[in-house]
Image (cartoon, helix red, strand yellow):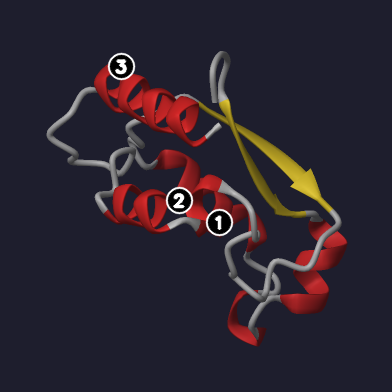
Amino acid sequence: MVSGSDLVYVPDADTWKRLAPTAYRDRRDEVLGRLKGVRWNRSLKWEDAAADFTDGRVIPGSLESTKGGAEFEAKNLFAPGCELTFEQARALWILIARCFA
């Protein structure tokens, strides 16, 4: 997250067909279009991936897996409507990541 856009990995078409809830199996483009249409407080690059995203757990050893990282993650610094600008939120997250490292 130091430079460039943040990556958002989404299930590729085959994975989506296999794992999405029945009501959404044929609506991948619609769902992704809505997500991409949100004014997220960050610069995003969307990438397809053939991966199982169903567990939703935090990766052990990551910043988000620490108590402090989880606390800042809960503040939704990059969510739409955050009081911080994208630049402020990014600078804060980078500072936290550096302290973690």
**Residue 95, percent across and down?**
38, 24
Tell whether label 1 touches label 2 (CB within 8 Å): yes
Secondary element under disc 1, as helix, strand or loop, is helix
According to the image, label 2 marks what residue?
34
Q: Which mark is residue 87?
A: 3
What is the CA distance from the residue labelled 2 to the residue labelled 1? Answer: 6 Å
* Quadrant showing the C terminus: top right
Give the amino acid at mark 3. Glu
Mark 1 or mark 3: whose residue is earlier in sequence: 1
**Residue 9, percent across and down?**
68, 47
In the depicted view, which residue is nearer to us: 1 or 36?
1
Q: Circle 1: is it few (<14), some (14-19), or many (20+) Cα within 10 Å?
A: few
In the depicted view, which residue is nearer to us: 21 or 2?
2
Identify whether 54 is placed above or below 3.
below
Q: Which mark is residue 74?
A: none
According to the image, label 1 marks what residue?
30
**Residue 65, percent across and down?**
52, 58
34 left or right of 60 in image? left
Q: Residue at x 56, y 13 (%)?
A: 3
Identify whether 48 is placed above or below 27.
above
In the depicted view, which residue is nearer to us: 39 or 33?
39
Residue located farthest toward the bottom when viewing the structure as drawn: 22
**Residue 7, percent across and down?**
62, 34
Tell whether label 3 touches label 1 (CB within 8 Å): no
